[in-house]
Image (cartoon, grey):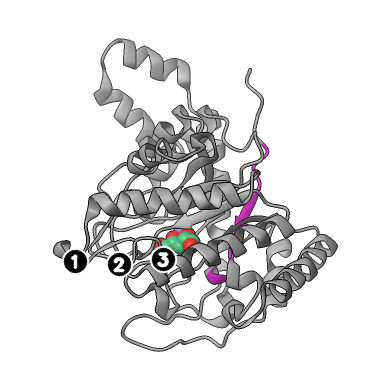
Amino acid sequence: MAKKTDYKFCFGPWNISEGQDPYGPTVRKPQTFDWKLSQLKAHGFDAMMFHDDDAVPDIDSKSAAQVLKEAKALKKRLDNLGIAAEMVAPRLWFHPSTIDGAYTSNDPKCRAYAIDRSRLSIDIAHELDTDILVLWLAREGSYIRESKDARRCVDLLVTAFDKMLAHDKGIRLAIEPKPNEPMDHAYIPTIGHALAVAQLTRDPKRVGCLIESAHATLAGLDPADEIDFACAFGKLWSLHLNDQNGLKYDQDRPFGCTNLRSAFDQVRSLERNCYGQRGEYVCFDVHPFRTTKEEHWMAHLVNSRSTFLHLLEKARSFDEKSAQKLVADRDYQNLDQMVIEHLLGR
Ligand code: XUL
Ligand code: MN
């Protein structure tokens, strides 16, 4: 029998968010970073994900030396608490230099800013002892098709990735595709696009991906199939499990809350690909509903983890033998019902 994975879990400080949306302000007072760290351990999580400015606040106002000093101090705090840093991601969508995109901005000065900041993020990752740089390419796309040359933008992305790969021989780039929001259309909307672009870089072996369930759903794809596809290439290096109710704004709902069967299929796919056995983490990129009271602030994370563990039990207790008999008989009708009954606990 295959070895059972002992899954490790993580989330980011932004997942304990204050409820702001485009139509209204925050509804919960911000929590301190220390509180977030203490909650992480208390609720059975093992690691934290970091944007570069989660790790070092106000990063743009500090010298590189100061940034690295603060990253070192953070690493000490994490070590003392027994918390790992899962990844670092450059936040390339807040600064004025990223208004028209970062690596694909039409302005060469803005592109230079994006690459410099990415290199600094890699140095932070190094200090935090993670070899994963996550790239959610937030503004690499267009609102107006004629504003950018999409062919040239592919070249610009490859140029930027090559500079990052050259900067640190140990870093691995995990591209997190998302088809839209904030852009009308993103240049890297799916895992297929991410892995294709990886092949154009100077070191394709160090360019892989991160799948977010909601992003796959927004692309009209099945998250479980995306997981299998990435794993067929050995390129699934991180994962943002959550849920999404149809084709609308990115919802980051608790894992399994909208489509329990899809969540079950994602867990099955992780299991058959032995995800987690090479040190990968299960991360939940989920947000509390705006209505959430401060005293229930961790519920969306705790519930996502708990649903994952329940579904893991369901995946492991699924009667594969009977399922295979139905498959051999092309009786998908009863296979369908078998899955439903299993999820209903019958
Ligand atoms: C955006 C998103 C980000 C990335 C990290 O939709 O998912 O939080 O996961 O930059
Ligand atoms: Mn994400």
- Ligand 1: which quarter? bottom left
Q: Which residues are magenta?
A: 6-14
Q: Earlier in the sequence, mark 1 or mark 2?
A: 2
Q: Which residue is pictured at 47% across the width and 87% down the height?
A: 27
Of the pair 59 and 212, the residue shown nearer to us: 59
Whether the residues at callouts 1 and 2 have beta carbons within 8 Å, the answer is: yes
Left or right: where 45 falls relative to 289: right
Whole-percent x, y for residue 100 in the image: 32, 71
Give the structural element (helix, strand or loop) at label 3: helix
Q: Earlier in the sequence, mark 3 or mark 2?
A: 2
Q: Residue furthest left?
A: 146
Whole-percent x, y for residue 258 in the image: 36, 55
Whole-percent x, y for residue 112 in the image: 46, 66
Q: CA distance from mark 3 to mark 2?
A: 8 Å
Report whether the residue tagged 1 is closer than 8 Å to ligand 1. Answer: no
Q: Quadrant of the N terminus?
A: top right
Q: CA distance from mark 1 to mark 2?
A: 9 Å
Q: Which residue is pictured at 33% across the width and 16% down the height?
A: 326
User: Is residue 1 in the magenta section?
Assistant: no
Give the structural element (helix, strand or loop) at label 1: helix
Crowding at dot 2, Cα within 10 Å, few <14 / some 14-19 / many 20+, comes out as some
Which one is closest to the eye, mark 1 or mark 2?
Answer: 2
Q: Which residue is pictured at 38% across the width and 67% down the height?
A: 108
Q: Which residue is mark 3?
A: 111
Q: Which residue is mark 1?
A: 147
Q: Which residue is mark 2?
A: 106
The reply to whether residue 236 is in sight is yes
